[in-house]
Amino acid sequence: MNSNPFQTIAIGVAFSPNLKANLYEAARLSGFFNSKLVLIHVGEPSEEKKSKINEILEPFIKEGISTELLFRAGDPVEIILACVIEKKVDLLILGALQRENFLKYYVGSIARKITRKALCSVLLHINPSIERIPCKHIVVNGLKDERTQDAIAAAFYMGHALQSEQLTIVEEISQEEIAVKVDDDKSLRRATLMKEKLRRREDYRIKEILETIPEEHKKNMYIKTQPIFGKRGYSIGHYAKVVRADLLVMNAPGKIGFWDRFFPHDIEHILTELPTDVLIIQ
Amino acid sequence: MSKKQSSIKVFLSTLPKNIFSGFVVSLIALPLGLGLAMASEAPPIAGIITAVVGGLVVSILGGSHITITGPGNGMVGVVLVAVTTLGLEGAYAAIICSGVVMILLGFLRMGKLADFFPSSAIQGMLAAIGLIILGKQFHIMLANKLSLEASIDYLIAIPETLLTVIHFQDKGLIYAAIVGVISLLIMIFYARIRNKYLQLIPAPMWIVIITIGFSYYYEYILQQPNPISPIYMLSGIPSANEIISDLPTPQFGLFATIPFWASVFALTLIASIESLLSIKAVDKLDPLKRRSNVNRDLKALGLATIGSGFLGGLNVVTVIARSSVNANNGGTNRSSNMAHALFLILFIALFSTQLTRIPLPALMAILVYTGYKLASPKLIRKIFSVGKEQLIIFFVTLFVTLFVDLITGIAAGVLVTFILHILVNRSFQMFFRNVLKPNVLMYREENGNYYLSVKHFCSFLNYYKLKEKLNAIPESADVVVDFSICEFVDHTVMENLHGYQDLFLKRGGHFELIGLDLHGADSNHPFAQRRMIPDLGFLTSNLTKRQKTLQEIADNFNLNYESEKTQNSHFLDNFHFFRTKKVENVYNRLFNTENTFRIFDINYSEGEFIAKENVKTTMLHIKLNHEIPQFTLDREGFLERVYALAGFADIPIHNHSDFSKRFYLLGENRTEIQMFFSDKIVQFFESNPYYHVESNGASLLVFGKERVAGVKEIKALYDFGRRLREVIP
């Protein structure tokens, strides 16, 4: 993993009431990571639009972040995906939608398509704000997966840059892994032992990953591991909600097949029900 | 090896007790078996065959411990339909097939099947079965045998029968009716008579003994024929030899027809539901606190049903009433079920001729009483107290079952329940969108508690997900189930969770529900369904179980308790912790008369723009007599709570490096704080559990987790606070 995984950050720009908040969030991140900010607007270019965006970004440009504004017409999904490749974007920021008037967020259909196909990491923002909301607690998945190492490293990098105070690595132990079905007292005892064994095995695995994280990133941070029992990819969102995390970091899923749309798993669950800001590491 | 030996020893030492218990159960099983079989229009001996095969097979292969198996009350309705549509031999074939299906269910681990039905719908169905039994047998009990079309007609004909009975001329019929009425009175008043010797023999057996004695009295002492009309005597009890020589041949001729499979379906469904509900209930009676393996039991019941069907018996199910008698009489393992079967064989082998001396009205009185118990007004009152909507579900199921059939009835019950849930929540979306989601999260908190959080909604539709998790917890553990982000919890779930509460309590664990205090309920019953009502005050006076326990705690410790929400939270204003937070309200307050010591639940948000749910937690506030320095103390590592104090360094306490290592102490006035933390205070914190403790100069704020505390945790918090108050000068 190189020193800065997020060299280029991109955000889709739409002239909605949230424009200022969205741009502020993106620009702030660029500031934290020292990365270039690519703004993609799907639509015809015009001077008016350009000046409006520049006006909002002015305080950040003064601080020295570099921005690039792109105007492209066509299908938003394709354009954004193409720009991601063209500009070698490392992190794409997308906004989430709020369901009715409850504190429930989901990813809209366009953003969802982009998330599924994007070749870069994606940050799904539930509540862009002009004022900075401190990111105190990061939850990251510790699944047994080859990408987990990257996700955890990115979470630490992020936590370090955003000065987070706590980072929890969640090991989801799925029911299928506990091969013992609980029927009676005997099988319950076996299942409990099995769980304990799995927990220790997971803890050991996570510990090994933790050793690869630079000390500097771990400094000033309370690090915790938490095994949870639930559905893989879904329960971690539930956990993030229960512990009121500010950011959830997850692996990108493997290839999403036809059936996954009907039987959503892993990341798809999170997309329909965002517990908090979610960062999907590619 | 030694373990095995000792278990054999235990088995042998408890064997006499189990044999005795099996004997007592067989005394009930004999008349009940005969009666249930007759009520299903099968030959009376079929009931005994069912109990014998069930007892032998399930006691060897079953997975439960103190259950008794045999012909079930619930089966009467469906077997009756099977016999009338398929004929007796066809019905045997259907019974055999349903046995096969039950074995399959066992292998598919469908022991959770019974959880998919709302409890009020099941109650309604059982009440309908009760009424079917009662309606049909009532006429025979009064010696007025009728043959009508539908089961509802029998109920309507009850007044007519009463009129007919009064005008009876035939002496034989009058005697028969009198026997019926007396038997019914015995059934009703038996439980009220507290006599050690009388209670040795169960009521049904008393009826059998008295009526057989009555017939012998006429035969040998009065030398007269039995005055009861011979058509109302039990007939067709074959001797043991005849049972074996006259085995029925099941007719699989209708195998390919719809009515056949409809019957198989109904038989399997009711047999499984009745068995599973019984096993669940009986598990709570187990003196040795074991857990039944329901799937294994299903397989054993299925196998027993196949055997029973081939031998001319009915579906084998686990029966609640006989099982509880078994538990009460000291049954501790499956050998009592075996003994009950063996005693039944003995009875048939020795007394099959004596059994024909039992008058039918006497047997039917037993069934009428059983039927009445299933549909008693007391039950309806109980359901009504849970909520009006439960009564609607109950009656819809009841009437559809009576007027159409059982399967349609239970389906209607499920549908009505679902529709009512949608209406109550005014949202179909919530159910539709979330029904398939894995809505239960479980993890172990640092202190070893099991914590479960339930999201969206929890009703009969997805209860099995919660149940699966709960079943994976040893019953001796501490469990907290949090519903604070669950919008709707239905009656079925509340009732089942209450069952868990009992179970955990009995086995040394602790089971607590939290996060329901802000949900609204429409009735005062503890099992009432609860729905989250956003931004409305306390709509209801139905306190949750937690709130009631808080009330008790308040009484015990001479505190006042108020459950209402209040906005008055000014006493929290000076705390650093609340500097960036907005208190929404304070509720469930426990406080002493001077208001210097209070524990409360609090609901606060972390600022206007933060898109997170409000925090609901429990805190303790102690008002002090003297000024003390302002400080914040928490365990090392939990920096996030003191965010607002950022910039201050951990204050070391001299000579207590361990304390400094474990705790994070912050405050502005360093020297004063170091003075304040005397040896006594440091030792107190070192030797007690971690809490977040904060002083604003005049008072202390103490709290633990970022969630509402369970009752046990509140007691711990109270105790901590009381002792903390004492060490502070």
Image: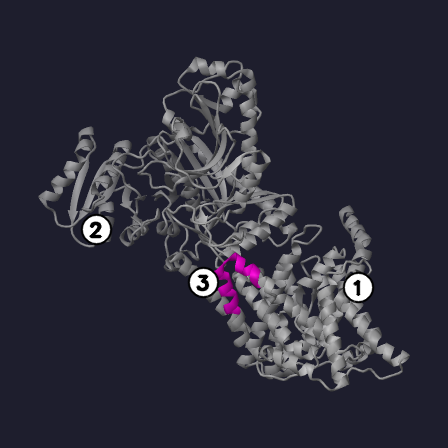
Q: Where is residue B395 in the image (x, y as percent from the top left)?
A: 52, 68
Number of numbered discs overlaid on the protein picture: 3
The residue identified by callout 2 is A79
Q: Do labels 3 and 1 share a chain?
A: yes
Q: Residue B201 carries which label?
A: 1
Asked whether residue B267 is in view, the answer is yes
Which residue lies at the image location 60% right of the left edge and 62% below the top edge? Answer: B378
**Vertical position of residue B598 compared to residue B172: above or below:** above
Is A177 in the magenta? no
Is B385 in the magenta? yes
The residue identified by callout 3 is B418
Q: Position of residue A30 (x, y in %)?
A: 25, 35
Q: What residue type is labelled 3?
A: Phe
Residue extending furthest toward the bottom: B169
Q: Which amino acid does label 2 sit on?
A: Ile
Q: In which quarter of the image is residue B571?
A: top left
Rate crowding at label 2 as few (under 14), some (14 to 19) or many (20 or more) other CA atoms within 10 Å: some
Whole-angstrom CA distance, mark 1 to mark 2, is: 85 Å
Q: Do labels 3 and 2 share a chain?
A: no
Whole-angstrom CA distance, mark 3 to mark 1, is: 45 Å
Rate crowding at label 3 as few (under 14), some (14 to 19) or many (20 or more) other CA atoms within 10 Å: some
Instruction: Tell me the chain of label 2.
Output: A
SS at mark 2 in the image: helix
Asked whether residue B302 is in view, the answer is no
Front disc: 3 or 1: 1
